[in-house]
Amino acid sequence: MWKEEEPLETTHPLILVENLFKSFGRAPKRVDVLKDITLTFSTGEAVAIYGSSGVGKTTFMHILGTLDRPTSGRIIYRGQDLFSMEEKALAAFRNREVGFVFQLYYLLPEFNALENTMMPALIQGMQRRQAAVKAEEILVEVGLKDRITHKPGELSGGEQQRVAVARSLILQPTLLLADEPTGNLDTATGHAIHDLLMRLNTEKGVTLIVVTHNREIASRIRRRIQMVDGKVFEEV
């Protein structure tokens, strides 16, 4: 069972990815998407994983966030083997420890910015009033003070992505995974979202992993890992 209060031991990285493989289908039509990936990620660092479309970046992010399981290999989080856990405990881990930001914002169109931001907290069982207070604080922090009661259809793409960022942060995750977070935005708006993510990494100490095909976006992050045909190559 996931123990959210378990302390981080200094001898462990936050995340150890060990000999990770992911395949789809069976021989002779099997497709190997991820090939023997071993990486470590430290608490509070910012990392860009970049590469062309179709090289396995999103698959890797989904596995890192426990939305999917590897074919083989392990992900050790704070010393705990995630995929040895039962699904209920894994869902609790994901809800508590991981925030997701996707290229498509996945906002619920019938709900306003505040209600969309509250959603993970309500799912966790937080009282609605408390969730609303926390959601409003975060929306103000990401620059949406005057857009709190607007529905997604009344917001620009950049504003919708800011709501998605706020939603990902409401439970104060340790790990923030951003998959092509600027992919649907113009250059100026994309840079603004990137700057927001980097500010949150610095100010909140959240570990930030950005997956992108955009080399220019990746170049703005200190640690960069290139993915080519399911393998990773760390820049030095």
Image: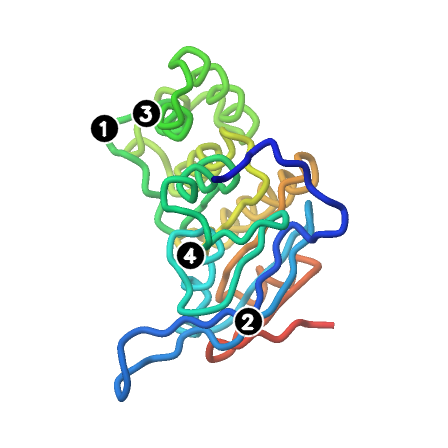
Q: Secondary structure at mark 1?
A: loop
Of mark 2 and mark 4, the one earlier in the sequence is 2
Type of residue at label 2?
Asn
Type of residue at label 3?
Asn
- Depicted 53 relative to depicted 220: above or below: below
Question: Looking at the picture, how far across and down is residue 126, in whole percent?
Answer: 42, 19
**Frontmost residue, 5 versus 49:** 5
* Disc number lying in front (2 or 4): 2
> Do the CB atoms of the residues marked 4 and 1 lie less than 8 Å apart?
no
Residue 112 - label: 3
Question: Looking at the picture, how far across and down is residue 44, in whole percent?
Answer: 68, 45
Q: State how far apart marks 4 and 1 are (Cα).
A: 27 Å
The residue that appears at 40% across and 75% down in the rendered structure is: 33
Quarter occupied by residue 157: top left
Q: State how far apart marks 2 and 4 are (Cα).
A: 16 Å
Q: Is residue 138 left or right of residue 31?
A: right
Type of residue at label 1?
Glu
Of mark 4 and mark 1, the one earlier in the sequence is 4
Q: Is residue 104 left or right of residue 41?
A: left
Residue 19 - label: 2
* Disc number lying in front (2 or 1): 2
